[in-house]
Amino acid sequence: MLCALVCAAGSCKVGLGDSVDTEAPSVKIVYPDPNTNAIIRDTFILYGECDDDKQITAVKVTLVNTDTGETVLRDEPATVDSLSKHWRIDLNKYSPENRYAGWQLADGKYTATARAYDGSHDSSSDEKSSASSSFEIDNTPPVFVIKNPGVVKSGTSSPSAYGSIFTIEGTIAELHSVSSMDVTIYDESGSIVSKENYKGEEISSFREENIETAGGTSVIIAQAGSARYDGIYGDSSGTQKYTCSIKLTDNAKKYVAPPESADQRTAEEAAADEKGNSTSSLYLYDDVYETLLSQKKDTSKKLQPTDLMNILNGTKSDDEARKILAGAEKDTSSAEESGRLYFSLNPNANPTYQVNGFEYKFGANATNQQASSGNAVSVTVTQGLDQTQIDLDGNEKSNATVKVWMKEYTASPESKEALAAELAETLAKKVRDLEDDRDGYSDSTFTEYSKATDNLPATEIEGWKLIYDYGKNNSGGASVSTKTFSVTLPEGSIVLNKYYMLAVTGRDIDGVEFAQNTIYGFLGNEAGVPPTLRILSPGSSSLQAATGFSFSGSAVLTGGSLYTSYLRAALSVTDQDTNADLGTYTEEISRAGADKGWTSTAAFTCAEDGSWTFSPSGLKDYEKIKAEKYSGKSYLYTLELYGKSSSGHDSTVSSNVQIDTVLPVVSISSITPTVDGSEYDSSSNTYVNGTITVKGAVEET
């Protein structure tokens, strides 16, 4: 009896034989790999290993949606193989009747727990008998609300206008990440013009990978001078029209090949499993903004793009919004042009700008302009070659205005290309997003930077500070083909020997943004002033009969030992009858020698007191722009005078004059009253008598 009691107390096996099950079963989850936090699409397989010293009677799976805390499956039996070594369960079956866009399980985060049973042990109390794994389910392709291109082709639609850069812009809602964007472009004949080589394979689209979604999406697809742009535009000229389709693919994967069956799949099947949810359908911003996204409607019903995604995948209920989305959906993969996005390209359409005299030179030995706080810089904005005028201070389509920005650098930037990319892809993009925010935009959206000591919340974008907003500094104005205005560098903002870059953002009335091909900037200085330049004669916009005249004015600088050290006169000539550009003719003079006397040319001179004269007839190419009296020519002369002080500070002034040598054309249309001589004396004479009226016309351009 004592021996029996001792054996019982110690779980003694003596005399019990092989019929007693002494080991609890074990279980593992091996597929999808629990160490990868898999993102799963479609029906999938949960697969694992199990073992026991006797026999596994069951493996059961419990599935919890950790986003909601809901247990969506409880003790669901898995299939165990005949050797009791492996188990599997198929999850998330598809049927049109299922709640979540046809799927059993909602998109979101899950934890699966597998428990093994052998009939003799309580698996719930044994850690070895259970295993857990976390993963995510994503059966919803990216939801794209696109701003640009913002129209599909129809009989009445105008294409979204682009210049030298073709971008895809909008907002993408996606649970995870967008692995690729494929853009297929068609010319007006319907031919695909977007072919390229991708990883050794020719594809009929332009593919961009790892698409950024946070804060909005802007993807540059093609830029003038690149192989892509040349492939689209070719040898064309002017504005060319195109259509395109866009396909977005996320990073979810299909998990239907556990280790036991992986070798049974073809390479094509395995590759297809690696591809995520794809869609070529999207929503035009203008189609869904007012009805779903605008704050102007009931704010309690205002939706975000993420809400649209959740409505589509069934995790959010909103029948009204679902109906609107169904009507607004655009399938850009349509074989018909009417289903594809519509846009135009013109590499010369971008408006341009100049910060006169401040083009920045790169390189170790480059010499750049200097400027200090309070200096005025002259900015000229000019329409693109498509003749679309510039929107100076916003219109009914957008809040876009011409804005001038400045950024400080401790050392000179090294790469012109990197800086141009920053201007186009960061500064201009973020300014555009702010301007196009219909609900969030207000008068305080952009605040000018005025002083380094100001506590005002000046607008700053990646270090670029707003120093001038045309719309806030002028009392409105129509769109223009060109405009020159002055911008004063903020007081207290320039530090000696630091570097400052200048940039201008804005658009034409078609929404095409300024080209950012030329970099402008200067080296900081803390002393000195620019010369005061004036064009006194002839008056701006005056009319001259011929070119036998001279421009004259003054270039003076007061204070200390400073003096005007350099002048440049640039005469631009336009034929007003043909609108042809006849060129720009430049003359330069400076102070040289020990006495600092002015040099001179046949066309350009300056006296000691700063009075200067510029005579077009002194230009060596004068015959090209000569317009003698009665010659019938009509030219526009624009003179830009640039001056620099001995301290390195500069200024610019400009004026234009119309040259008109076309004679007026006079005609007589009637003289009344008259009498035919044949009625009185049988002659062929025409007689007048008494008070007569002579009528006619004078034609003068």
Image (cartoon, rainbow, N blue to C red):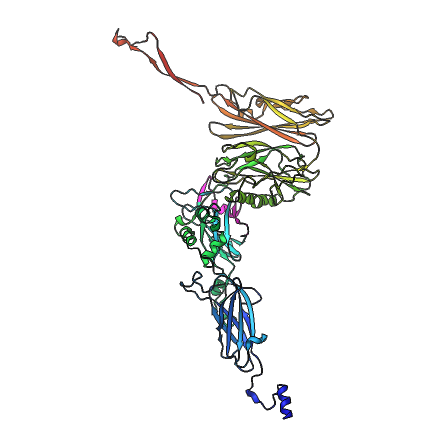
Look at 50% across and 19% down and name the residue there. Answer: 629
- Tell whether 491 sits left or right of 277: right
What segment carries the magenta color? 214-241
For the C terminus, the quadrant is: top left
2 to 652, vertically: above or below: below
Q: Position of residue 690 (x, y in %)?
A: 33, 7
Say above or below: 71 vs 209. below
Compared across the picture, whether 123 is left or right of 98 comes to right
Residue 631 position within the rendered picture, expressed as x and y whole percent measured from the top left: 48, 21
Residue 421 vs residue 144, the one in the foreground: 144
Is residue 155 or residue 682 the one in the foreground? Answer: 155
Is 400 above or below relative to 130?
Answer: above
Can residue 613 be seen at all in this image of the molecule? no
Q: Is 234 inside the magenta-drawn segment?
A: yes
In percent of the image, x 53 and y 54: which residue is there? 209
Extreme residue in the right direction: 594
State whether residue 556 appears in this view. Answer: yes
Residue 341 place in picture, x, y as percent: 44, 48
Quadrant location, the N terminus? bottom right
| 226 within the magenta span | yes
Quarter of the figure with residue 417: top right
Depth check, front residue: 147 or 12: 12
In the image, residue 333 above or below residue 606: below
Who is closer to the viewer here, 234 or 623?
234
Residue 391 x %, y %:
51, 36
Picture mark count = 0
Residue that extends furthest to the top in the rendered view of this protein:
681
